[in-house]
Image (cartoon, grey):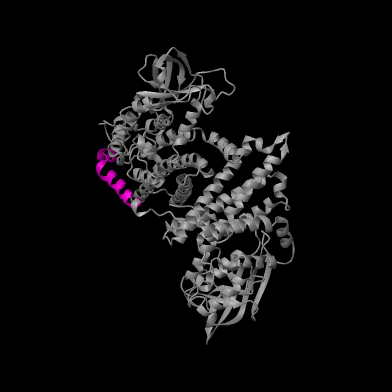
C-alpha cells in the first residue's frame, strides 16, 4: 500500500503547479475568453514545450507513456487554474482514440502533430438525442468502393469549431443503438461537405455542431476496425471521465480555499464572516466533500492503472460523486461569497460554471449512478 | 502508487482468516448469524480468544504485549474481523486506558494494569461526561481532593457505557479549581468500582436497552498512586486517548460488512417476492452509501499510509469520525426501511442469551428500528459531529 508519487510523477506535478501559479493568471484567461479566439495559441505552444501534450501517448509513439495517475495530476491543476485550452478535447478525447488505433500509418501521421501542438483535433461522438449513450450513433458511413461516404450531424463537439482534424463515430452497419457497426474515422476538417456551426459554451469554452453532407473519406482514415469502434470510444471516454473528475477535484480545491480566504477577509457586523459558526460548518462540509472526492479520484486512477476489472465501476462512482458534491460545493461557494459570487468578474463564478459543465460531460450524476449499479 | 498487498501481507491475511474460521469461538459467530445480541460473557470470550492468539493489543507496541502490526496488517485484521462478523471489541480497556497507561503510567502501574487489560480479565469503563459537561467536557465538576496519600472523589459521571459490568473506571476529575484555563487542573484517575461510595444507576436508552449508566461518587477514597502522570495534566492524557484510536475510528470495515448483509437481505426478499415496490430507488440509496463508503475507505487508507511513513496524519483524517458515523447511521436506516412492518415488533428479548420463549421474528428485522434508534448516539458520542466540525474549522482550515 503506497500513496506516494514516484520521482517522475512528483516532478510532473511540481511543474504543472508552478506553471499554473506563475504563468496562468485569471485576468489573462478572461482576456482570452473575451476575445474571438477559442483559446491562446501561445499557451498551447507552451504546453507542447512542457511536454504535456505528449503525456498520455506511448513511448512507441514518442510519447511519455503517462497513465491514469499522471493524467489525474495534470488535470487537477488545469482545473485549479481554470485552464481554457482544449487539453481534454484534443489530447484526452481525440488523442485517446487515435493512440488506441491499430492503424499504425494513421498514428504515425497524427500523433507527432498533436504532441508538437501543430494539430489540435476534436472528437465528435455525441448527437442530438444521444444524451450520454455512446452506442447511439445515427451518423452514417456508407462504403462506396474504397471510400466511405459520411452523412449526419454531431452535436456539441468540444473544440469542434477550430479543430484541424475531427475524429468521429459513424455507423457502418446495424441500427442506431447497436453496439456493433460503429466505426471511428478521422477526417480533415476542411474537406468538402463539412459544415461547422460554432458557439461558446456556458463555461467560456468553444464547441460546434458539425454536419457531414456526403463527406467522402478513404478506408485509410479509419481509426478503428470497421464496425468495431465502440471499444476504443468507450476506453477514451473512460479516461476522459477520470480526467474531468480530476479537473473537478482541482476546481473544488480552489473553490474551498478561495471561499475560506474570502470569509476571513470580508467584514460584516464588525467581524469577519468566517467567525460565524453557521458558515464555518458549511465550509467544513465543503472541505469534507473535497477530501472524499480526492479519495475516490485516487482509487479510480489506481484501479485504471492496474487494469482492474472494477475500474469502470470505480470511475462511474467517482464521476457520480464529483458531479453531486462538486455542484453542491460550487453553489455553496457562490452563496458564501454573497453578491460577489454572482458577479461575472470573480473567479468563483467561473469555477462554478466549469464544475457545472463537468457534471454534464460524459454523463451526469444520475447517469453515472445508474452505470455504477449496472456494473456492480 | 498502489494498493496491493505484499506476499507477506497476503500470507498474514490467510492466517487471520483461518483464525476466525477455526480458532475463534464458533458458537459466538453462530449466534451472530442469528442476530443474537452479545452478553458480557460473549464479549469477554471473544476478546480472550484474541488474547490467546496474541492479538488483543492490536495497536499496542510489542514491549507491552501488543502485536506491533504495521498499518496494513491492522487494516487487514479489521477487515477480516468484520467479515467474520465478530462482536465488537469493548474499547475502554484495550483501546483507551491501556494506551494511556503504557504511555503516561509508572512502571508499577504498567505492571499492575496492563496484563489484566490484555487478557480481558478486568472490565473497564470510561468516566468522562457529566450531567453538566457533555461536548463541553472541560466544564466537568467532579472533584478529587488530595487528603494525605488518598484522593477523595465527589461528583457524578454519566452516559457511562456498560458500567454495570465494570471492575474499574478511569475518570477525569478536577484537582485544582484555581486555574487560568478550565482545561488545566484536571487529573486522570483510576478507580476500582467496588470502592465504598460508588453507586451505579441504569439509564435506559430510547431502544429500551440498559447500556449506559450514571455513576455517583460520594466521598470515594482511592490511593494517590492511582493518578496517571502528573496531577493537573489529565486534559492532555484525555485528549491523547480520544485521538489514539485512529486505525479503526471510521468503522469502515464494519460498515462494509453490514452493507454486504443488507444486500443479502434484499436479495432474499426479492427471491421471496417481498422486495420493496420501489426497489430501484432503494438500490440507488444503497449505491450512494456504498460509494461514500469507498471514498471513506480510501480516506482512511490515505491517513494510514501517511502515518506508516512516519508523517503526521493529513487533514483528511479529521473527517473520519463524522463521515464514518454518518455512514453507520445511513446503513441503520436502510435496514430499517427494508424491514418495513417487520421492524415494528419490539422483540429484543428474543435475541438475548438464554431466551426460551416463542420465536416471533426469524430474520432480525425486529432489531432494525431498535438499532436505528440506539445508534443516533454515534453522531453524538466521542465529541459530537458538530464539535468535530469546530475542530476541523479551527485546526485544519484555520478559520
Return the residue nearer the eye: A5 or A234.
A5
Per the rendered image, the range of residues in magenta is B9-31
**Image x and y of residue B34, in percent:** 30, 40
Please say whether residue B25 is one of the residues in the magenta stretch. yes
| Residue that appears at 41% across and 45% down | B71
**Image x and y of residue A162, in percent:** 67, 71
| Residue that appears at 40% across and 34% down | B95
- On the image, which quarter does residue A358 sit in? bottom right
| Direction from residue B320 to residue A84 in the image, left or right | right
A352 versus B103 height, above or below: below
- On the image, which quarter does residue B344 sit in? top left
B312 versus A36 height, above or below: above
- What secondary structure is the stretch in magenta mostly built from? helix
Q: How many marks?
A: 0
Residue A121 visible at all: no
Q: Quadrant of the C terminus of chain B?
A: top right
**Image x and y of residue A121, in percent:** 61, 71
Please say whether residue B330 is one of the residues in the magenta stretch. no
A174 versus A46 height, above or below: below
**Image x and y of residue A54, in percent:** 57, 68
Pick out the residue farthest to the front: B107
Return the residue nearer the eye: A215 or B381.
B381
Residue A223 visible at all: yes
| Direction from residue B206 to residue B35 in the image, left or right | left
Amino acid at each position: 500500500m503506497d500513496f506516494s508519487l514516484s520521482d517522475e510523477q512528483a516532478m510532473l506535478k511540481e511543474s504543472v503547479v508552478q506553471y499554473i501559479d506563475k504563468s496562468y493568471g485569471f485576468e489573462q484567461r478572461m482576456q482570452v475568453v473575451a476575445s474571438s479566439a477559442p483559446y491562446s495559441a501561445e499557451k498551447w505552444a507552451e504546453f507542447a514545450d512542457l511536454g504535456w501534450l505528449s503525456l498520455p501517448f506511448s513511448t512507441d509513439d514518442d510519447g511519455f507513456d503517462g497513465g491514469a495517475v499522471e493524467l489525474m495530476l495534470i488535470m487537477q491543476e488545469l482545473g485549479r487554474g481554470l485552464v481554457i485550452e482544449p487539453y481534454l478535447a484534443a489530447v484526452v478525447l481525440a488523442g485517446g482514440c487515435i493512440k488506441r488505433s491499430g492503424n499504425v500509418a494513421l498514428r504515425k501521421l497524427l500523433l507527432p502533430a498533436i504532441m508538437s501542438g501543430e494539430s489540435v483535433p476534436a472528437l465528435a461522438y455525441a448527437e442530438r438525442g444521444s444524451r450520454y449513450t455512446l452506442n447511439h450513433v445515427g451518423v452514417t458511413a456508407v462504403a462506396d468502393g474504397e471510400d466511405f461516404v459520411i452523412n449526419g450531424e454531431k452535436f456539441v463537439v468540444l473544440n469542434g469549431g477550430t479543430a484541424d482534424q475531427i475524429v468521429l463515430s459513424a455507423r457502418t452497419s446495424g441500427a442506431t443503438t447497436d453496439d456493433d457497426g460503429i466505426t471511428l474515422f478521422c477526417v480533415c476538417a476542411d474537406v468538402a461537405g463539412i459544415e461547422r456551426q460554432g458557439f461558446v459554451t456556458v463555461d467560456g469554452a468553444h464547441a460546434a455542431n458539425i454536419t457531414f453532407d456526403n463527406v467522402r473519406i478513404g478506408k485509410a482514415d479509419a481509426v478503428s476496425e470497421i464496425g468495431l469502434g465502440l471499444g476504443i470510444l468507450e476506453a477514451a471516454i473512460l479516461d476522459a471521465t477520470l480526467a474531468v473528475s480530476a479537473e473537478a477535484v482541482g476546481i473544488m480545491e480552489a473553490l474551498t480555499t478561495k471561499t475560506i480566504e474570502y470569509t476571513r477577509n470580508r467584514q460584516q457586523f464588525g467581524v469577519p464572516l468566517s467567525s460565524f459558526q453557521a458558515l464555518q460548518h458549511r465550509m467544513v462540509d465543503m472541505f469534507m466533500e473535497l477530501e472524499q472526492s480526492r479519495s475516490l479520484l485516487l482509487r479510480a486512477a489506481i484501479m485504471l492503472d492496474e487494469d482492474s476489472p472494477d475500474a469502470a465501476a470505480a470511475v462511474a462512482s467517482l464521476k457520480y460523486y464529483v458531479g453531486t458534491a462538486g455542484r453542491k460545493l460550487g453553489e455553496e461557494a457562490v452563496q458564501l461569497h454573497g453578491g460577489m459570487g454572482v458577479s461575472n468578474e470573480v473567479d468563483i463564478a467561473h469555477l462554478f460554471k466549469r464544475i457545472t459543465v463537468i457534471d454534464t460531460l460524459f454523463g451526469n450524476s444520475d447517469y453515472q449512478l445508474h452505470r455504477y449499479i449496472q456494473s456492480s | 502508487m498502489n494498493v496491493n498487498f505484499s506476499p507477506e501481507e497476503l500470507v498474514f491475511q490467510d492466517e487471520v482468516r483461518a483464525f476466525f474460521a477455526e480458532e475463534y469461538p464458533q458458537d459466538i459467530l453462530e449466534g451472530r448469524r442469528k442476530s443474537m445480541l452479545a452478553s458480557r460473557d460473549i464479549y469477554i470470550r471473544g476478546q480472550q480468544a484474541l488474547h490467546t492468539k496474541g492479538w488483543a493489543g492490536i495497536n499496542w507496541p510489542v514491549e507491552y504485549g501488543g502485536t506491533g502490526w504495521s498499518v496494513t496488517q491492522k487494516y487487514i485484521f479489521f477487515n477480516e474481523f468484520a467479515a467474520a462478523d465478530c462482536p465488537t471489541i469493548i474499547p475502554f480497556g484495550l483501546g483507551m486506558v491501556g494506551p494511556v497507561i503504557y504511555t503516561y503510567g509508572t512502571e508499577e502501574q504498567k505492571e499492575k494494569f496492563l496484563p489484566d487489560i490484555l487478557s480481558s480479565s478486568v472490565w473497564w469503563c470510561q468516566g468522562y461526561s457529566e450531567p453538566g459537561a457533555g461536548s463541553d467536557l472541560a466544564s466537568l465538576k467532579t472533584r478529587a481532593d488530595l487528603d494525605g496519600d488518598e484522593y477523595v472523589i465527589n461528583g457524578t459521571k454519566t452516559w457511562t457505557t456498560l458500567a454495570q459490568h465494570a471492575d474499574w473506571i478511569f475518570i477525569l476529575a478536577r484537582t485544582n479549581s484555581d486555574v487560568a484555563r478550565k482545561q488545566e487542573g484536571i487529573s486522570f484517575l483510576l478507580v476500582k468500582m467496588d470502592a465504598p461510595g460508588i453507586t451505579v444507576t441504569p439509564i435506559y436508552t430510547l431502544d429500551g436497552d440498559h447500556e449506559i449508566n450514571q455513576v455517583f461518587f460520594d466521598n470515594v477514597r482511592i490511593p494517590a498512586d492511582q493518578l496517571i502522570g502528573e496531577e493537573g495534566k489529565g486534559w492532555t492524557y484525555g485528549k491523547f486517548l480520544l485521538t489514539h484510536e485512529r486505525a479503526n475510528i471510521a468503522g469502515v470495515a464494519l460498515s462494509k460488512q453490514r452493507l454486504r448483509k443488507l444486500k443479502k437481505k434484499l436479495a432474499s426478499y426479492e427471491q421471496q417476492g417481498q422486495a420493496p415496490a420501489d426497489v430501484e430507488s432503494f438500490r440507488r440509496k444503497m449505491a450512494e452509501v456504498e460509494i461514500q463508503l469507498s471514498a471513506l475507505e480510501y480516506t482512511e487508507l490515505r491517513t494510514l499510509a501517511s502515518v506508516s511513513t512516519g508523517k503526521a496524519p493529513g487533514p483528511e483524517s479529521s473527517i473520519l469520525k463524522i463521515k464514518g458515523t454518518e455512514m453507520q447511521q445511513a446503513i441503520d436506516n436502510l435496514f430499517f426501511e427494508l424491514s418495513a412492518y417487520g421492524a415494528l415488533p419490539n422483540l429484543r428479548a428474543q435475541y438475548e442469551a438464554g431466551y426460551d420463549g416463542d420465536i416471533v421474528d426469524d430474520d432480525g428485522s425486529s432489531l432494525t428500528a431498535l438499532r436505528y434508534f440506539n445508534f443516533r448516539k454515534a453522531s453524538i458520542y466521542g465529541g459530537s459531529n458538530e464539535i468535530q466540525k469546530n475542530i476541523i474549522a479551527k485546526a485544519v482550515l484555520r478559520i
